[in-house]
Image (spheres, rainbow, N blue to C red):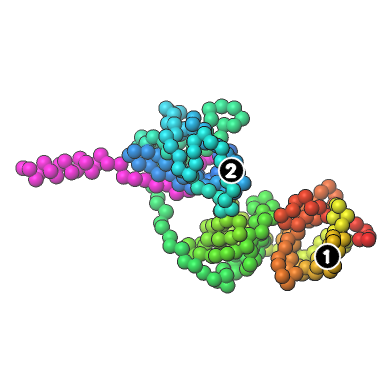
Amino acid sequence: MKKRYLIVILLLCTFQVWAQKVIYNPVHEGMNFSAELTKIELTEEETILHFFMKRGVSFIIPSITHIQDDSNQGDKMFIKKAVGLNIGESVLVDNPEGMIYKLYFPPLNKTITTIDYKEHDSGEANWYIKNINISNTTVAPKLEKQPIALADLPKSFFGSWHDKYGTLIALATPEFLLYEFKMYRYRDIYKTGDGTFLLHTSGGNIDILKHTQDSLTLRYDKMVILNRDQRNITMPEEVKGNWKHFMGVKKIRITDTYFYNDDTGIPNINEIENNRIITIGSSKSGDVFWFLLDNGKHFNAFKAEKNGSNYVLTPTGFPGAIYRKVKNIN
């Protein structure tokens, strides 16, 4: 009889315990701030939202931050604590690899399937994530990172990549990734799964979540799905010729194969730098061109972007260093 009672008690305890549930990369209907919601943990004691924030962003988590049942706008469940930052204090993300932080809320009823996240109740600064799906019970498998050599990067990764609008977003080479016209040099590369890998770069970590010959999914500050540009882009006639820096001391002559950078107007610079063009990328419209250059010592990149009826030329990292085309370089 005692053994029978013990079995009943154990079964009751088993049914009453909330098994921990983890949702990776939760699906939602939209958000209006720069962070990325990477994971949600649901336990009997609390609800934990995991975020990633990219470098350069300044933000604050106010004490009225809360989650709420999306289906019937039930009671607000206010934030209890945070890990990685202090509630109510301004944060500037200055780490090149960004930052992660966790926000803790009261536990959710098991019947709730979607929630809203809100940092304010009203006004222009009403930061939110709408209709977060927490019904997904799929747990992402833990993948071991395996270091690989640069030479083992898949060839299908290299090339020019557009978003669905035809905007040039990324240009991948065996040495670096030009993403949103910023250069990310590879430091370490790890294989994370079948056809996926993690790039440790000079500007932080970039996850290659999926890639084929024709499509690429990556995550840095956000997740983007890109399509390969299959065209063979050559030097446009409108870009070839002579260019002059807006301050008048620097000049560039562009041919089909070289950028000849003449900075001899600056003290202690006595030679013209010959930069070989190694790759050209373009938006589908032809309003933007990216040029990857190699002078034998280091890589560089320039962008030609149409402004009105003419192009302007700028180097990566210096958006204010504008060159305009001239008929005579002297």
Is any atom of residue 215 visible in this view?
Answer: no
Looking at the image, is 37 positioned above or below residue 147? above
- Label 1 SS: loop
> Which amino acid does the dot numbered 1 rest on?
Ile
**Residue type indicated by callout 2:** Leu
Q: Position of residue 215 (x, y in %)?
A: 59, 59
Residue in the image at 49% along x and 30% along y:
64
Residue at 72% from the left image edge and 63% from the top image edge? 300
- Which residue is at 10% across, 44% downward? 4
Q: Position of residue 78 (x, y in %)?
A: 44, 31
- Count residues near mark 2 (Cα–Cα under 10 Å), then give few for <14, some for 14-19, many for 20+: few
| Front one among 124 and 317 | 317
In the picture, measured across the screen, residue 311 lies left or right of residue 183, that is right
Q: Nearer the viewer, residue 41 or 15?
A: 41
Q: Nearer the viewer, residue 58 or 10?
A: 58
Between residues 267 and 201, which one lies in front from this camera angle? 267
Question: Quadrant location of the C terminus?
Answer: bottom right
Q: Quadrant of the N terminus?
A: top left
Q: Is residue 285 above or below residue 10?
A: below
Q: What span is in magenta?
A: 1-30
Percent x, y for residue 25?
Answer: 48, 48
Q: Is residue 275 magenta?
A: no
Mark 2 — residue? 92
Q: Which residue is mark 1?
A: 269
Compared with 232, 79 (above or below) is: above
Q: Is residue 223 left or right of residue 291?
A: left
| Picture quadrant of residue 12 | top left
Earlier residue among tags 1 and 2: 2
* Disc 1 residue crowd, few under 14, some 14–19, many 20+, Cα 10 Å: few
* Relative side of 6 to 219, left or right: left
Residue beneath the point at 53% across and 40% down: 29
